[in-house]
Amino acid sequence: MPTKEDALALLRTAVGSANAEFRPGQWEAISGLLQRQKLLVVQRTGWGKSIIYFLAAKLLRQRGSGFVLLISPLLSLMRNQIDAARRIQVRAETINSTNDADWARIQKSLERGAVDLLLVSPERLGNEHFVSRVLLPAASRIGLMVVDEAHCISDWGHDFRPDYRRITRILRALPPNIPVLATTATANDRVVEDIESQLGPNLQTIRGPLARESLVLQNLHLPSKAERLAWLASHLPQLPGSGVIYTLTIRDAENVASWLRSCALNVAAYHSELESEERERLESSLLHNEVKALVATVALGMGFDKPDLGFVVHFQRPSSVVAYYQQVGRAGRAIALAHGVLLSGAEDDEIAEYFIANAFPSKEQVEQFLAVLREGPMTIGNLQDRLNIRMGKLAEIIRFLTLESPAPIRKLDKSYVRNPVQWRMPVERITRLTQLRRNEQQRMQEYLSTTTCLMQFLARELSDPDAAPCGRCANCGGDGMGSEFSRELERLALGFLNRLDLPIEPRKMWPGGLMFEGVKGKIAPESRNQRGRALCRWGDPGFGELVREGKQRTNAFADSLVRGAAELITQRWNPQPRPQWLTCVPSRRKPALVSKFAQELANRLGIPFVRCLRKIRHTEPQKTRENTFQQVRNLESAFEIDSALVRPSPVLLVDDMVDSKWTFTVLGFKLLQAGSGPVFPFALADSSIRDGD
């Protein structure tokens, strides 16, 4: 049996310090795993939970045990952990969506015992090939199972992830005496009880104090985005070191980063839509203090480890107090002073409700999906053709149903089929969890308004028995950053928001297998639109609010929108070859709204407005059509073009809104077929959904 001295020698090698000592609870956890116990470790971020399983892996392998299976939720976490493991000569590998070229090599290494630690995401446990070809054949050789960020396994956890349900199924397939380690920094008593019930009997909990002694917390309510942008530009240079600015949406991450760069601040946007290589490059730039801040969604979250992170600022209110603790706890792990500043704004409630309302597929959508499958096997294309459900939601429904137990569907080759099982929509569970999320939002609002110690409030939410006033936060009289900012910066920020034009990328393919007016497959380059532009995002401050007001209330677009559109087209966009005439998307519901705007825009641009398009069939609003099949079908034989009026020169095709881009695609195709020159789409507002992480 390895001794504490053996483990301490490894620790000192791992951290590169001859004087390093275990923190209270670390050796006890390692010792428990060596004795084949099941442990749940609840300790604050930066405490050193990962060192437990790295050292346990090394010591277990030295005594002949099998490899460690580590389940971890984020790729950024995987990169950090793989590097840390290799520093102490633990042979660590990962199988994930970004390294498929290495899978065969890793599988062979696993088979010959040359892997000490295999790290996978919970989603990988749902991959039939991985489970049947890699995991199950190696199950008898697993010497330790680790569930990192274990709060994700709990229905009550702030970041519950359905794919974590698969972990309990995997545990049932492993030897009953295998040691298990679950770790988290964000589990209150209710979450702990849920984890214990799912990971099996005899799970022992090691809990430590969760307060962060280095953090100075403060809350600032600044309703408008322009105010918060001005505050950031004013105060970011004074914040210590480098840090993270969290936003709730991808759109805001990009916009905030763009604004700060325009103020000569060295920042970059980080979110899930970036390629893996770019995300890794940005993580490295923050780790090495090559940027002042990353403006990030929760894609930069659990497990990102920078001990000297100087600040975490939130541009909007997070989903829960516990999620906030998880994120703000990134700062100040190994420095004496760090700042956690929570900004909140007018849009917070709307964003929070959007995420809550879309957390689960609706009962109606699930029933429609299952009804279609009763007719026989269906590919994704078949399902899109039959169901008015967007692709993202369709993927959610499939994942939701495959994770149910028993699962009512399964994948067979490239199709989905019904399973012969009794299943009903878990309405009660969904209602309970939806209400929980709303309760969490209420607690977050209470945190924003409390006059008590902010750190104590967070610790109590996590059921920390040692919660006490910190003496450092703004409510305890600590030295925060202040709420003042330059009104000139606020004016410039509002102008910046008004100039956030957006590209309209041309569609290049018709929906797979769908014939549209005699054509299908690839849209030929000569039948394809040019890259277009939208003036603003629907509902955003400035122009976005004016578009909403004109469309929903006044039935007329303000003159300032005409001026703003003309400025965008002639000064910032400047499409080439320059449009020589203008036409617009016709409407039968509000025939004058877009055409009047188009006429005024043409006058300001000094080009003729030509009414060559006519709508001849009623269609449902495109926003009610949820996927590409339904959107294109909705437009079939809906428009007529007067070829005699079409000019052979470049044209500006104008509409008030763009979402799927199919209306622009279809009308551009018709214009080009009729002999038009290059078609440049222009919309007042982009209403597409792109609010993920």
Image (tube, helix red, strand yellow):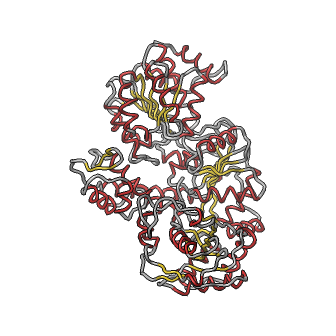
Q: Residue at x 61, y 75 (%)?
A: 676
Q: Residue at x 51, y 34 (%)?
A: 208
Q: Residue at x 46, y 65 (%)?
A: 519
Q: Which quadrant is home to the N terminus?
A: top left
Q: Is residue 275 above or below residue 609?
A: above
Residue 554 at least partly seen: no
> Is 550 displayed left or right of 38 in the figure?
right
Residue 14 at least partly seen: yes
Q: Is residue 643 above or below residue 280?
A: below
Q: Where does residue 437 sit, x and y in percent of width and height? A: 43, 56
Q: Where does residue 295 sit, x and y in percent of width and height? A: 65, 52
Nearest the viewer among 64 and 383 is 383
Snapshot quadrant of residue 192: top left
Nearest the viewer among 95 and 580 is 580
Nearest the viewer among 325 and 462 is 325
Q: Total of numbered circles in the picture?
A: 0
Q: Residue at x 45, y 23 (%)?
A: 110
Q: Where does residue 217 sit, x and y in percent of width and height? A: 63, 50
Q: Is residue 236 above or below residue 616?
A: above
Q: Where does residue 59 sit, x and y in percent of width and height? A: 50, 17
Nearest the viewer among 598 and 116 is 598
> Is 24 displayed left or right of 287 in the figure?
left
